[in-house]
Amino acid sequence: MLFLLLLSALADLKTDRIPNGFILLGIACGIAGSLLSGRELSGILASVTLAFLLMYPLYRIGAFGAGDVKLFVLIGSFQKTGEVMVILVGAFVIGAGFSLLKLAAEKNGRERLCCLISYLQEIRRTRHWKIYGKDLKQDYHTYCKNKIHFAVPILFSTVCRIGGLF
């Protein structure tokens, strides 16, 4: 699992994409390994489903990419639901730390906060969710500058959990 997460993080950093082959291979290995270790299929499906249900709404509003959702499904095929939750929370905390460092380094915290407030006001005004940063995606350079590659916090969180740091 860690090797596939590492490859996925490297691919995300290099190409902004996580190949589906990594994900499918990982899920197949996770399911097979879990079944061989005595885990019930219902437990595996519960972990995978939980990971998907928690991440999919965030994908739908543009907060995360499809690859990030699929990485958590991969983790769910290896880990029990409680472990998936711990890794998910850890990834959010690590990702928030990365984001704060990026904001400090680029000195655009005020600009990004104004963008977030504007986004939230638009949702409140229209009472409809829209894709966050959709206007930024039109300018690919600006879009890439204002994002982090979440596969890296996912990898770090998984390593920390397996290593017993949290």
Image (spheres, rainbow, N blue to C red):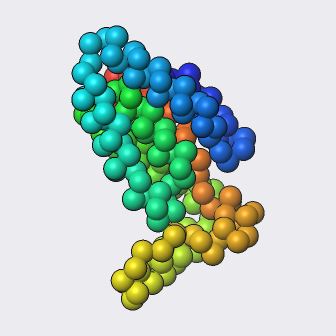
Which of the two residues, 33 or 150, is positioned nearer the viewer here? 33
Residue 23 position (above or below residue 149): above
Residue 148 spot, x, y in % from top left: 58, 52
Seen in the image, is 91 located left or right of residue 83? Answer: right
The quarter of the picture where residue 121 lies is bottom left
Residue 149 position (above or below residue 2): below
The quarter of the picture where residue 140 lies is bottom right
The quarter of the picture where residue 128 lies is bottom left
Residue at left offset 53%, top offset 31%: 24
Residue 142 position (above or below residue 156): below
Residue 134 spot, x, y in % from top left: 59, 71
- Looking at the figure, which quarter contains the C terminus? top left
Which of the two residues, 61 or 100, is positioned nearer the viewer here? 61
Determine if residue 24 is in view. Answer: yes
Residue at left offset 53%, top offset 50%: 66
Residue 162 spot, x, y in % from top left: 38, 22
Residue at left offset 66%, top offset 34%: 10
Residue 113 spot, x, y in % from top left: 50, 72
Seen in the image, is 164 located left or right of residue 58? Answer: left
Which of the two residues, 41 or 155, is positioned nearer the viewer here? 41
The single residue placed furthest to the front in the displayed view is: 41
Residue at left offset 57%, top offset 60%: 103
Residue 130 position (above or below residue 154): below
Number of numbered discs overlaid on the protein picture: 0
